[in-house]
Image (cartoon, rainbow, N blue to C red):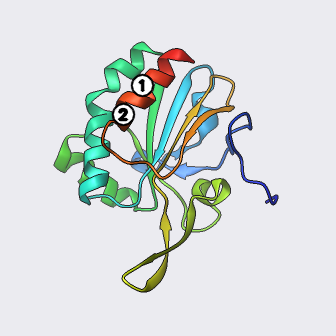
Amino acid sequence: MSDTLPGEGDMMPDVAMEGADGTVIKPSDFRGRKLVVFFYPKDMTPGCTTENVEFSAAKAKFEEANTALLGVSKDSYARHEKFIAKHELSVPLASDPEEDGLADALGIWTEKKMYGKTFMGMVRTTYLVDADGRIARVWPKVKVKGHVEDVLEAARAL
């Protein structure tokens, strides 16, 4: 990996992740339409649940804007399935590999500190990717409140 991390104007790294039923899913699978990839720390936690529920509620509006949605965390796909069922989520989720995954390639799987402990964790980040696979917009360190509306507005404008 180079010293510079991909950002706006760069191609979205095409790293394989585990999708539904063990299928392989990559950002390039969505070429020809816009894609919102939202990375969140962990299934079943309050902020992550709110974010996933709100993206699911807005899915039809994103589809009207020719924009696919994909939620990504390091959780296993089995955990994703429980999360989807419990909250009736309609947005597809992908399980990013533990090492050398898409979050690693983007620099958002990083060292975090909480309560004096240091650990590896996901920085809540959203990427809007254009139909050609280029990163059009990045929302780093996302605050969940109002986020889905901001992303939808940007997707419509792209």
Q: Report the residue at 41% width, 19% height from top.
A: 63
Up-down: is 144 above or below 1? above
Residue visible at 69% across and 31% down?
A: 134
- Mark 2 residue crowding within 10 angstroms, few (<14) / some (14–19) / many (20+): some
Give 11 or 75, whichever is nearer the viewer. Answer: 11
The residue at which mark 2 appears reads as 148
**Toward the viewer: 5 or 31?**
5
Residue 8 image point, x, y percent: 68, 37
Can you tell which quarter of the image residue 46 is in?
bottom left
Q: Secondary structure at mark 2?
A: helix
Numbered mark located on residue 152 in the image: 1
Residue 50: x, y in percent?
25, 46
- CB atoms of marks 2 and 1 within 8 Å: yes
Quadrant location of the C terminus? Answer: top right
Q: Residue at x 39, y 39 (%)?
A: 92
Q: Tell me if I can see residue 90 in this picture.
A: no
User: What's the residue at 34%, 45% (across, down)?
Assistant: 144
- For the residue pair 90 and 41, the one nearer the viewer reads as 41
In the displayed image of the protein, which residue is found farthest to the left? 86
Seen as rendered, the residue at the extreme bottom is 116
Q: Secondary structure at mark 1?
A: helix
* Three-letter code, disc 1: Leu
Residue type, label 2: Val
